[in-house]
Image (cartoon, helix red, strand yellow):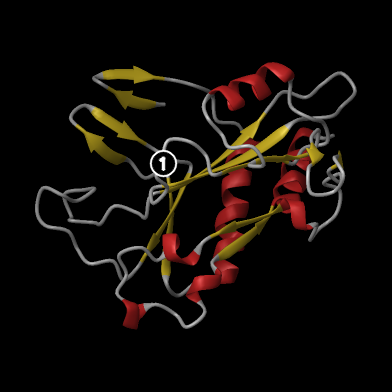
Amino acid sequence: MYLDSGNIKVYETPLPFHARTAGKIIGLMTIWNGQDFDYASEKTLILGLNIERKPDCMIAPIYCPRPAAGQASSSTRTAYPTMIVLSIKIFGVRADNTIALTASLYLRTSPTSLIPIMIISFGTAGIDTSIVNYINGIGVLPGNLIGVGFTDPNNNNNNYPSCNVANIPTYLLNIPGAALFNEVSAPLRPVEFAAGFTLDLWELQVVIRRQLNI
């Protein structure tokens, strides 16, 4: 639920698998780096006059400088989080107890910031053709839509492997360190910051399937 141009819009009802997926992401990122980021849930972000969004979880660098009055995300002059958007889409369970899942990564630093730089299908089934057509229609680059249900052009167009165990390279989604630590001055960045954070999507699939009992 969010405010858009003065209208309240509800796009889905939060259910346990939404909350636990968000919690898993926070948990994995905290293990990776618990000292340089603040982690939160249900943070309302004011994006403009009569426009706000409330992500399921938020990760913000601790050492971002406080913005000037009128440019903050709240009345306490809290800086806006680095604008990396990770969208996890959980489709409905199918008759054969399989499910399609996608992870879409957007970066503010991308020249096309409203188009995902990567979409990975990581469920136990591929996504519907209508969804694939929509994704292609919004301008996602060839090769940036990968995973379950697709073929790998770098491997003789063989199918990508199933997402059925940890540490399969196809399902390791890297969030660049330069984007995570954007606006943090160089002396305050950890030495290894450039490597960024790598999210194993198998970990999320396990949580989702457990909650859906499939």
At x 85%, y 54%, the residue is: 165
- Residue 212: quarter of image: top right
Instruction: Looking at the picture, tell me which residue is in the foreground, 98 or 39.
Output: 98
Residue 152 is situated, as x and y percent measured from the top left of the image, at 80, 43
Quadrant (top left, top right, bottom left, bottom right) of the N terminus: top left
The amino acid sitting under disc 1 is Ser
Residue that appears at 48% across and 74% down: 193
Q: Quadrant of residue 172?
A: bottom right
Q: Is residue 83 left or right of residue 162?
A: left
- Label 1: element kind: loop
Q: Which residue is mark 1?
A: 113
Q: Is residue 16 above or below residue 105?
A: above
Residue at 33% of width from left, 83% of height from top?
Answer: 187
As drawn, is 50 to the left or to the right of 168? Answer: left
- Quadrant in the picture for residue 117: top right
Question: Percent from the top left, x then y, of residue 113?
Answer: 41, 41
Q: In the drawing, does residue 212 fall left or right of residue 103?
A: right
